[in-house]
Amino acid sequence: MNILLTGASGLLGRSLMKTLAPLAEGGSLTGLAFSRAKAPLAALDLTDAAAVRAAFGRYKPDLVVHAAAERRPDVVDGDPEAAEKLNVGATALLAAEAASAAARFLYVSTDYVFDGSAPPYRIDSPTHPLQAYGRMKLAGEEAVAAAFGSRADFFAVVRIPILYGRVESLGESPVTELAAKVFAGKPFSCEDWASRYPAHADDVARAVALVCGRLSAGEGGTWHFAGAEMLTKCAMARAIAAAFGADPALVRSDPNPPSGAPRPRDCRLDDSRLRALGFSPEIRFAEGVRAAVSPFAPRP
């Protein structure tokens, strides 16, 4: 089949370009990007309605995987208008075009649609986002459902937690950002308040590919990906320090909620629907984060 992937230059998108390729055998896999578009990816501004419609006419997708988003809550707060155009407007546009073309649609969402007060969250748990980013992603979910109406077997939503993996820069993920502080070798305070469940991009990509296969067979709806390990940001930073022989005591525990956009305390997701298919994450945090940040580690 023909697959159209948005956000193909991003952390998750790069992994998806690999895991979705077998599904496109005999058809095409077109990765879309914007600010980092370079061959073999195609450049497309997802907020340009005419350009998006032209892309559907050109690539004729049977499946659209929408992974592009502004995922940084503080950046969303800094420019909510621009974030809403991408996170909500572009999502609604893509879903409407997919529905019109009878193409199936998978939307990558977030655990931040929940407020973190009553984990674990099932796929049917009430949503209550605390910040603009979570509200926009929830609005994206609603826009997708509205576009397809009664054709619930034509779309899927995959909610994921905090993401990390092989990055192009340490600032690409809030997890690998911690490595820059560790590598600086100076003591620093790190938030030790919220429970996080970091997900490696390669594991999430495998889950998305699995859901795409189920969606193609007519099984839509909401799916949850749950990271296998609970870690605060402080615990992540100390794990990075230990992996590279730095003194974990450099990382000082800060028991207070982080500043900036409000974060949920614990958004653990119930991933029983995925596990019923035999899926579970394979990459342990210590090994995954070491591989992800090794290229940026100081040389002895």
Image (cartoon, rainbow, N blue to C red):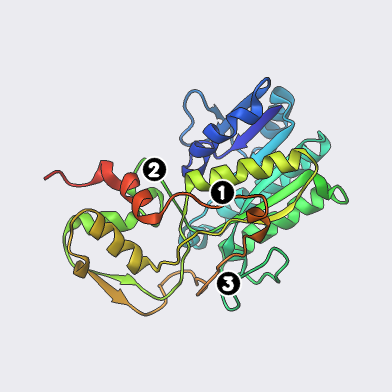
Q: Secondary structure at mark 3?
A: loop
In space, the residues marked 2 and 1 are separated at their CA atoms by: 18 Å
* Residue at the spot of label 2: 166
Of callouts 3 and 1, which one flags the residue occurring earlier in the amino acid sequence?
Answer: 1
Asked whether 81 or 171 is in front, the reply is 171
Residue located at (58% from left, 62% from top): 111
Q: Secondary structure at mark 1?
A: loop
The mark lying in front, picked from 3 and 2, is: 2
* Residue at the spot of label 1: 69
Amino acid type at image mark 2: Arg
Dots 3, 2 in contact, CB < 8 A: no
Residue located at (55% from left, 35% from top): 19
Instruction: Tell me where residue 21 appears, x and y as whole percent.
Output: 59, 29
How many residues crowd around disc 1 within 10 Å: few (fewer than 14), some, or many (20 or more)?
A: many
How many marks the image carries: the answer is 3
Residue located at (72% from left, 29% from top): 61
Quadrant in the picture for the C terminus = top left
In space, the residues marked 3 and 1 are separated at their CA atoms by: 18 Å
Asked whether 55 or 297 is in front, the reply is 297
